Image: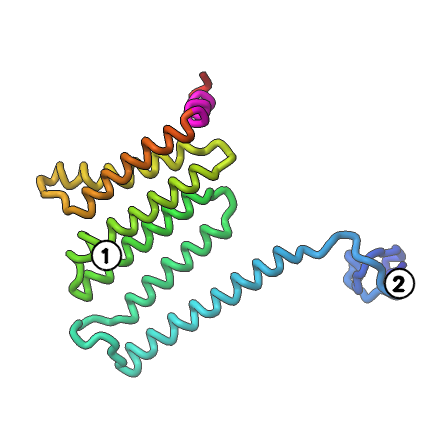
Amino acid sequence: MKTCPYCKIEVGGNLNKCPFCQSRLSGSEDEEPYFPAPTILKLTSLFYKIQLFIVWTLIIGSLGADYLFGVKIYKNGNFHWSLLVLMWLIAFEFGIMRLFKKGFGSSRILTLFAFIVTVMLVVTSYYLGMLMFTLKWVCPIILAGVMIANFVLAMIDKSGNSMAYLILNFFIGVMPYIVLYIMGRDCPYAWSADLLLSIILFIGAVIFKGREVVSEIERRLNF
């Protein structure tokens, strides 16, 4: 047991300094720590710091290459490509922060990532001259993947949150079609396929998880 020569107290564990006056302790060798070391938390913190350092390195490097050295990676566009890189990396960092934040379920994280990626693709394709292709094909393909992933998550979910997956899938598939209909525009084939896919997956989830969905509705509405 170590002792503090100034506070005249005994200090256990593997501390080297007094917890009160921060003076160096004297006495016997270190003992076993009272509490286990938070290994997982340390690894998580280290991973977050490493990726944050990489992100900032890429941001500073791209801005420097674009504005200081005039490097052009896209010959047909008169815009600063480093701003697109900055936008993507900030969006990536925002997504990583959501992953580390507690209280976010798999469905919410997946849908949030898909929404961020879709917005970034639309902005990027606008500057690259591929906006219509992205809106007609890339965006609906991404949303179709999200709906299928949500359906799988609803099948394996054991926490009684099936309604969240059903509602997300329904709105992801149906809302774009409603918006296009209100705007008086023809719905592209890919978006029409998303509409049919959302209805099929909704019916499938109700068939396979019907009792759990009814129980969840009763629980949420306090029936």
Q: Position of residue 141 (x, y in %)?
A: 26, 51
Q: In the image, is 43 to the left or to the right of 121?
A: right
Q: At 24% from the left edge and 55% from the top edge, which residue is drawn?
A: 138
Q: Is residue 191 above or below residue 208?
A: below
Mark 2 to mark 1 CA distance (whole Å): 67 Å
Quick one: SS at disc 2? loop
- Residue identified by numbered label 1: 122
Q: Is residue 39 above or below residue 101?
A: below
Provide the residue span drawn in magenta: 211-219
Relative to 58, is 5 above or below?
A: above
Q: Secondary structure at mark 1?
A: helix
Q: Main secondary structure of the magenta part?
A: helix
Answer whether residue 220 is visible to the viewer in this image: no
Of residue 191 and residue 30, the one placed in the foreground of this image is 191
Residue at position x 9%, y 43% in the image: 185
| Of the pair 175 and 150, the residue shown nearer to us | 150
**201 vs 20, nearest the viewer:** 201
Q: Quadrant of residue 132?
A: bottom left
Where does the image place residue 113, in percent across and percent down from the top left? 37, 51
Residue displayed at 79% across by 53% down: 34
Q: Residue furthest bottom?
A: 69
Name the side, left or right, on which 10 lies relative to 192: right
Give the amino acid at mark 1.
Answer: Val
**Percent of width and height locating residue 153:** 43, 41
Question: Label 2 crowding class (10 Å Cα cut-off): few <14, some 14-19, many 20+?
Answer: some
In the rendering, which numbered label is found on residue 5? 2
